[in-house]
Image: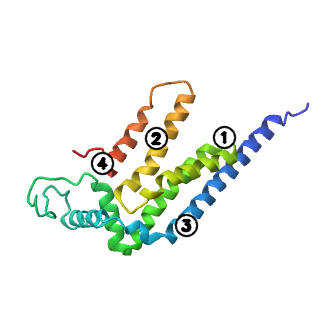
């Protein structure tokens, strides 16, 4: 009785291909993170970073969400809420723990992870050279926005959201899966979706 090794061979090749793709995405993550860290000071050139850190520090020290404007001259005391509260807490905690390195490191890791995640997904769908080109184009489009600000959290979440939608759509069901709802809630907590 002969054993058919063809299915085992095909499975081994798929696992090896997935491992190579994962290692390539990991290499891209670390390479991009290193490049972004070299320009770390530029990630702090957005004046809103200071506002986000101050609001986050108020929430950390007060133990509650900010609901009154205490920082502006024209609207002091007016009703206001920190719509990016979750990311402001993360940035402020890291700033108080690691100094300016904390927010820079977080922004670098989040953005490098988003591009590496996109690259890994593309490797399974297109040729390696096309995946590299598309990942570089994505990086070029977002590069001016890579700063230590709350929207840095949204990049990997949006990439994850799009990957799930594309995979789900390719499987034939046009409706988005319900398990994406918590991801949308996370995006709203980190970003501007509840802004008014």
Q: Pointer 4: what residue?
A: 192
Real-space Cα distance between discs 4 and 1? 33 Å
Q: Residues within 10 Å of mark 4 (few under 14, many from 20)?
A: some
Q: Residue at x 48, y 25 (%)?
A: 174
Give the alpha-carbon distance from disc 3 to disc 2, as whole Å.
26 Å
Quadrant where the C terminus is found in the figure: top left
Q: Nearer the viewer, mark 3 or mark 2?
A: 3
Give the CA distance from mark 4 to mark 2: 17 Å
Q: Where residue 169 sits in the image (x, y, percent)? A: 53, 29
**Which residue position is annotated with label 1?**
126
Q: Is residue 103 visible?
A: no
Residue at point 35% right, 57% down? 150
Residue visible at 64% across and 50% down in the picture? 132
Q: Which residue bears the numbered disc 3?
A: 35
Q: Nearer the viewer, residue 124 or 185?
A: 124
The quadrant of the picture occupied by the N terminus is: top right
Q: Quadrant of residue 102?
A: bottom left
Q: CA distance from mark 3 to mark 4?
A: 28 Å
Between label 4 and label 2, give the one nearer the viewer: 4
Query: What residue is disc 2 on?
Result: 161
Name the spot of residue 12 as percent of width and height, x first. 76, 44
Q: Secondary structure at mark 4?
A: loop
Q: Earlier in the sequence, mark 3 or mark 4?
A: 3
Q: Kindly indicate whether the residue at mark 2 contacts the one at mark 4 (C-beta within 8 angstroms).
A: no
Q: From the viewer's side, name the closer residue of 114 and 181.
A: 114
Compared across the picture, whether 128 is left or right of 188 comes to right
In terms of secondary structure, where does tag 1 sit? loop
Res. 3 image quadrant: top right
């Amino acid at each position: 009785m002969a054993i058919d090794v063809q299915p085992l061979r095909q499975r081994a090749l798929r696992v090896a291909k997935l491992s190579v793709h994962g290692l390539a995405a990991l290499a891209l993550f670390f390479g991009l993170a290193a490049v972004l860290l070299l320009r770390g000071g530029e990630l702090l050139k957005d004046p809103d970073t200071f506002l986000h850190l101050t609001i986050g520090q108020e929430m950390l020290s007060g133990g509650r969400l900010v609901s009154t404007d205490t920082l502006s001259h024209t609207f002091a005391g007016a009703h206001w809420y920190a719509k990016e509260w979750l990311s402001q807490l993360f940035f402020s905690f890291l700033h108080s723990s690691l100094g300016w390195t904390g927010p820079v490191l977080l922004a670098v890791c989040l953005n490098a992870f988003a591009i590496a995640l996109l690259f890994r997904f593309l490797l399974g769908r297109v040729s390696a050279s096309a995946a590299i080109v598309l990942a570089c184009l994505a990086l070029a489009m977002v590069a001016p926005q890579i700063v230590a600000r709350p929207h840095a959290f949204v990049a990997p979440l949006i990439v994850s959201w799009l990957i799930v939608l594309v995979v789900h759509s390719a499987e034939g069901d046009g409706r988005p899966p319900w398990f994406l709802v918590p991801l949308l809630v996370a995006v709203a907590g980190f970003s501007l979706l509840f802004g008014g």
